[in-house]
């Protein structure tokens, strides 16, 4: 098994999660601010790919509620194709349904902290919380992909060994 990155691609941020070599679980890693160009996104991704010796990217695919691909899914696929073309090393790409990943991430993290004296959160608190949600959502997406590989194929017969 090799190291993998989970990606929750957004318009403003990219949530990143990591599953290291042989790990069966994903963990939130970082949140990148989207660059104005694909090259800016690529520079940040290349650094992570090289640093962690990444062999696979699992990208959240934002399907519509009914399960069809819409505009956002098309934009995500276009971004992934451009990244795949521009990378200078062999990396496997996979897509996972990301519906409800941000909702689940918010449930894991709990509510956003309040501001001073119980007032509304500051802009900094809101931005920090959104960044945490994005990387937690990336971990959920990557964990879903890891779990899917661990589920045995029901069409393959299994044998149980017993010892006496």
Image (cartoon, rainbow, N blue to C red):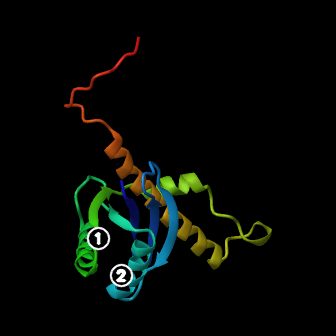
- The structure residue drawn at horizontal position 22% and vertical position 57%, both measured from the top left corner, is 68
Q: Which residue is mark 2?
A: 42
Label 2 vs 1, first from the N-terminus: 2
120 is higher (above) or lower (below) than 137: below
Mark 2 falls on what kind of element? helix
Answer yes or no: is residue 53 visible: yes
Mark 1 falls on what kind of element? helix
Q: Nearer the viewer, residue 11 or 142?
A: 142
- The structure residue drawn at horizontal position 57% and vertical position 75%, both measured from the top left corner, is 127
Give the spatial CA distance, label 2 vs label 1: 14 Å
Answer yes or no: is residue 64 visible: no
List x then y, in percent, for residue 91: 28, 68
93 is higher (above) or lower (below) than 107: below
In the image as oriented, which residue stretches furthest toward the left? 155
84 is higher (above) or lower (below) than 150: below
Q: Nearer the viewer, residue 43 or 63?
A: 43
The disc label shown at residue 111, or none: none
List x then y, in percent, for residue 100: 41, 54
Q: Which residue is mark 1?
A: 76
């Amino acid at each position: 098994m090799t190291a993998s990155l989970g990606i929750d691609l957004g318009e403003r941020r990219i949530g990143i999660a990591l599953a290291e070599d042989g790990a069966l679980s994903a963990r939130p890693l970082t949140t990148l601010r989207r660059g104005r160009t694909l090259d800016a996104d690529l520079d940040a991704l290349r650094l992570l790919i090289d640093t962690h010796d990444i062999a696979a990217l699992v990208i959240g695919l934002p399907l519509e509620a009914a399960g069809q691909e819409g505009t956002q899914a098309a934009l995500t696929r276009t971004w992934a194709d451009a990244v795949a073309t521009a990378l200078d090393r062999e990396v496997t790409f996979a897509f996972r349904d990301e519906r409800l990943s941000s909702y689940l991430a918010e449930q894991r993290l709990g509510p956003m902290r309040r501001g001073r004296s119980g007032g509304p959160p500051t802009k900094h608190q809101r931005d920090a919380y959104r960044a945490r949600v994005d990387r937690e959502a990336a971990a959920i997406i990557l964990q879903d992909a890891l779990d899917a590989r661990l589920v045995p194929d029901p069409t393959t017969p299994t044998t149980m060994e017993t010892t006496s």
